[in-house]
Image: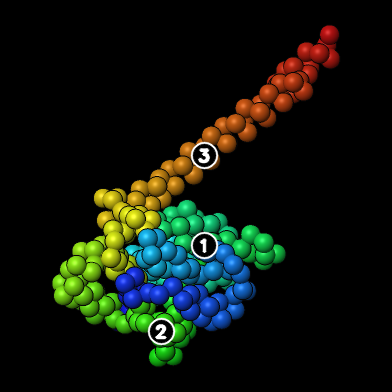
Amino acid sequence: MSYGILFDTTKCIGCEGCMYACREQNGLPENDQYKLSAQNYTVVKSVQDTYYRQMCMHCEDPACVSVCPVGALEKTEEGPVVYDAQKCIGCRYCMVSCPFSVPKYEWASPNPAISKCVMCYERIQEGEIPACADICPTGATQFGKRDELLAEAHRRIEENPDLYYPHVYGETEAGGTSVLFLSSIPFTELGFPEGEEYQKAFPTYTWKAQKEIPNVVVFGGVFLYGLWWIVNRRIEIDNGTMSGTGKREENE
């Protein structure tokens, strides 16, 4: 059963309750930054008096999961994309591959790891809802089954065409995401990435690069071996160890 979050900008009053609840739930320090970081898994921003959230989109087919070489990131059946710091080797491929620039690295930590929202996965497993949805006083952040949230989003647009921009962000973006957005203004004005390249699951792009890795490794190995042979051959020549050279010098 796949769950998700529906965020409706028309209902958000910018109280930032979701930010504080997220920090408390995840043991994050208080700070005055309004950008995703190792200390902020979600932030509330505003454009033209429209409040919106930034957080992990929990893609249906996540690019971060597809590029992780050790399985530190996993897309669960329940919907959240979770992270296991014990498996992470710090390659940060997930940061490069994410179309929404969500994963952040704990640069200041002596034992750094990747940080991001996991949709309060432990709470979901215990039958509870994510902290951000639980604290929201207006219902701007709603948690539920993804298909039901999607149907609800379309119902709101159909019943209130003058209130909503006619698109559910996350229905198709990045191949579909578990976090959906409704807005009264175009999503491009909120800074959300859009375009034809965002209508496919991003692993279809990352695989093109990944499938070349074996060829690169083989070619690189052959090249390095050849370079090693040439260098050592020249050393042998310089030391006069080629066949016959030493004897000729002794006879002279």
Colour convention of the picture: rainbow
44 or 175, nearer to the observer: 44
Q: Quadrant of residue 62?
A: bottom left
- Disc 2 marks which residue? 137
1 vs 2, front mark: 2
Q: Quadrant of residue 151?
A: bottom left
Which amino acid, mark 1? Answer: Lys
Question: Which residue lies at the image location 38% right of the left edge and 65% below the top edge?
Answer: 49
Name the mark on residue 127: none
- Disc 1 marks which residue? 35
- Disc 3 marks which residue? 220
Counting labels gives: 3
Q: Earlier in the sequence, mark 1 or mark 2?
A: 1
Which amino acid, mark 3? Answer: Gly
Which residue of the protein is positioned furthest toward the left in this rendering? Answer: 158
3 vs 2, front mark: 2
Question: Which residue lies at the image location 57% right of the left edge and 32% below the top edge?
Answer: 226
Label 2 Cα neighbours within 10 Å, binned few <14 / some 14-19 / many ≥20? some
Q: In x, y percent, where is residue 51?
A: 39, 68
- State the separation of the CA atoms marked 3 and 2: 57 Å
Seen in the image, is 69 located left or right of residue 47?
A: right
Query: Mark 2: which secondary structure?
Result: loop
Query: Mark 1: which secondary structure?
Result: loop
Residue 212, placed above or below residue 241: below
